[in-house]
Amino acid sequence: MLVIQGCVRLLCILLAIVSSALQTDTASITMLLRDSTSVRMRPVTPADRDQLVRGFEELSEEARFQRFFTPVARLSSTQLDYLTDIDHVDHFAWGAESIDGAGIGIARYVRTGSDIAEAAFTITDDYQGRGLGWWLFQALAMVAADHQLSRFEMTMLADNSAMAHLASKAGAHFEPPTGTTVRAEVELNPALWSDLPRSSELRRLAAAVAAAA
Ligand SMILES: CC(C)(COP(=O)(O)OP(=O)(O)OC[C@H]1O[C@@H](n2cnc3c(N)ncnc32)[C@H](O)[C@@H]1OP(=O)(O)O)[C@@H](O)C(=O)NCCC(=O)NCCS
C-alpha cells in the first residue's frame, strides 16, 4: 500500500513539473487582432535571420522605401547580423509572426543616448491597418521603459501618414520636416501600454531574453 501511495505521489510530482514547464514555455505570446486573426509575438533572436529574409521579401517596394528611405532589394548579411544579433537591452526587437510561422512585423529600438532610443516599425502589407503596429509600439515602449529609456525618437518620410498616425496616437511631438523626412519624439509612460493585451507575459518574455543574453 505504501509503495502504491509513493508511486502516486511521484506521478503527481512529475505531472506538476511537466504542467509547470508547459505553462512557462513562453517562447512566444499569442494575440488576437481585432478581426480575430491570431498572431504570435516574441523577441527577435539570431535564429530569426531566415524568417527576416522571407518577411522582407513579402514587403512591397513602397513599404521598404518607407522603412529605409531608399530602395532596398534585399538585406545584406551585415544588415541581417545587425538586425538579429542584439543584446535585448540597448537594442531590442519584437517580431510578430502568423500562426503558420511567417514573419509579419518587427518593432525595434536602438539606444541612441542615456534615456532615448531610435524606434522603427515594419508590418508586412497584408497585415497593415489591422492594429498590429500599435500593439508592437506599445510592447516596445513597455520594454524600453524597463531598460531605463524614457523617450523614443522616430524619423519617417513626411508623407508616411500611417506612421504619423501611429506616432500621434502615442502622443508624439513632431519637429518641422527636414527635406523629405520628419523627426518625432514620444515620452514613454505606462499609460501608453495600459491597454496592451497580455502585457505581463510579454514583459516577462522580454526580461527572460535580456537575462539570458
Ligand atoms: C507604419 C506602420 C508600422 C503602421 O502599422 P499598422 O499595423 O499598419 O498600424 P495599425 O493598424 O496599428 O494602426 C495604427 C493607427 O494608425 C492608423 N493608420 C493605419 N494606417 C493608416 C494610414 N495609411 N493612414 C492613416 N492612418 C493609418 C490606424 O487607423 C490606427 O489608428 P486608430 O487606432 O486611431 O484607428 C505600417 O503601416 C508599416 O509597416 N508601414 C511600412 C513601413 C513604415 O512605414 N515604417 C515606419 C518607418 S519609421
Image (spheres, rainbow, N blue to C red):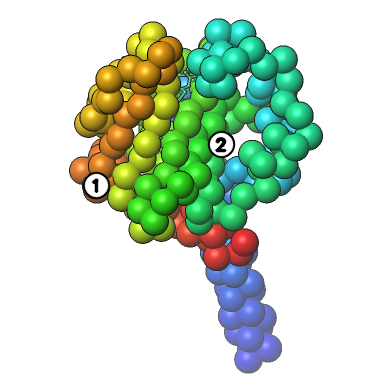
Does the image show residue 198?
A: no
**Circle 2 is placed at which residue position?**
95
Q: In which quarter of the image is ligand 1?
A: top left
On the image, the x and y values in percent for residue 52 come to 68, 30
Mark 1 residue element: loop
**Circle 1 is placed at which residue position?**
189
Q: In which quarter of the image is the N terminus?
A: bottom right
On the image, the x and y values in percent for residue 114 come to 39, 56
Furthest-right residue in this view: 77
Q: Nearer the viewer, residue 107 or 111?
A: 111
Residue 34 picture quarter: top left
Above or below 146: residue 188: above
Crowdedness near tag 2: few (<14), some (14–19) or many (≥20) residues, C-alpha within 10 Å: many
Q: In the image, is 48 to the left or to the right of 40?
A: right
Contact between labelled residues 2 and 1, with CB atoms less than 8 Å apart: no
Q: In the image, is 152 to the left or to the right of 23?
A: left
Residue 148 picture quarter: bottom left
On the image, the x and y values in percent for residue 171 come to 22, 31
Q: Quadrant of the C terminus?
A: bottom right
On the image, the x and y values in percent for residue 192 come to 26, 40
Q: Identity of the amino acid at label 1?
A: Asn
Furthest-bottom residue in this view: 2
Above or below 59: residue 103: below
Mark 2 residue element: strand
Marks 1 and 2, Cα distance to the nearest angstrom? 22 Å
Q: Which residue is drawn at 72% across and 15% down?
A: 73
